[in-house]
Image (cartoon, rainbow, N blue to C red):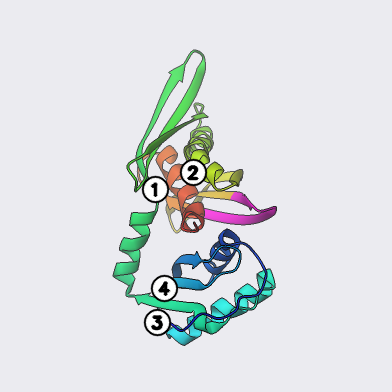
Amino acid sequence: MTQGSKGPPVVGGSPPDLEGTLLRVPGVVKVHVVGGDAPTEIHVVTAGGRSAKQYVRDVQSLASAELGRRIDYRIISVVQLDEKDADVLQRELRPWIERVSMGTRGKTEWVEVALGWPDGRVTEGLGAGGKSRQARARGAAAATVACLDPELGSRGQTIEVSAVELQSIGGAEWVLVHLFFYWKGESVPLLGSALVADDVASAAARALLDAVNRKLLAR
């Protein structure tokens, strides 16, 4: 771990902005900023082979380039996990798929998705489906967005799906989901993928979570 005394931060992005930005550093799996608009501590959890000093430099460089913020290295602490521990941490922080089901209401076919959350909540969403596999994939992606909306809305975030595609890659079928993540007036393009192991609807839900799960680590 690398940790030091508190130093004077420079005015820049708010803590959510800073946390979300620092999650883009390769190997960083969790960020927590203490101190409101004038951070006094930045705690970074990492997984990877680089040294703590390198992560500190990456944090400083990205904060300066993206937010115009100069960060004193002394307020940054780095905790390094091995790959196994990092995977466990990420699973504990992210939502998971409870179920994906399909049905008909009136003349409309629907896909329903339910997500479980670490705090015990279960959120549900519906998306218009159809008879084609492409339509079921799009419906599942829309339903997953509806499941995420309560959590994202509480953070002032939204996502917009721009494309859901079925692709054959290496002899297997995959679902690719392209979306835009909106936060603090900025739009970030994201891409997620999932192997079709059973139905395309389940794969589409997994692909959408693959795209946004890293963003959900920013608090």
- The secondary structure type at the circle numbered 3 is loop
The segment highlighted magenta reads: 179-192
Circle nearer the N terminus (2, 1): 1
Pick out the residue farthest to the top. Answer: 106
Q: What residue would you read off at disc 1?
A: 95
Residue 127 sits above or below residue 185 on the image: above
| Number of residues whose C-alpha sits closer than 10 Å to that of mark 3, classed few (under 14), some (14–19) or many (20 or more) | few
Which sits earlier in the primary sequence, circle 1 or circle 4?
A: 4
Q: Element type at marker 4?
A: strand
Horizontal and vertical percent for residue 82? 32, 75
Q: Nearer the viewer, residue 15 or 107?
A: 15
Q: Which mark is residue 181?
A: none
Which residue shows up at 55% across the image and 55% down it?
Answer: 191
Visible in this render: residue 26?
A: no
Marks 1/4: CA–CA distance: 20 Å
Is disc 4 surrounded by few (<14), some (14 to 19) or many (20+) residues within 10 Å?
many
Q: Examine the structure image and report whether residue 189 is included in the region drawn in magenta.
A: yes
The reply to whether the C-beta atoms of the residues labelled 3 and 4 are less than 8 Å apart is: no
Per the image, the residue denoted by label 4 is 46
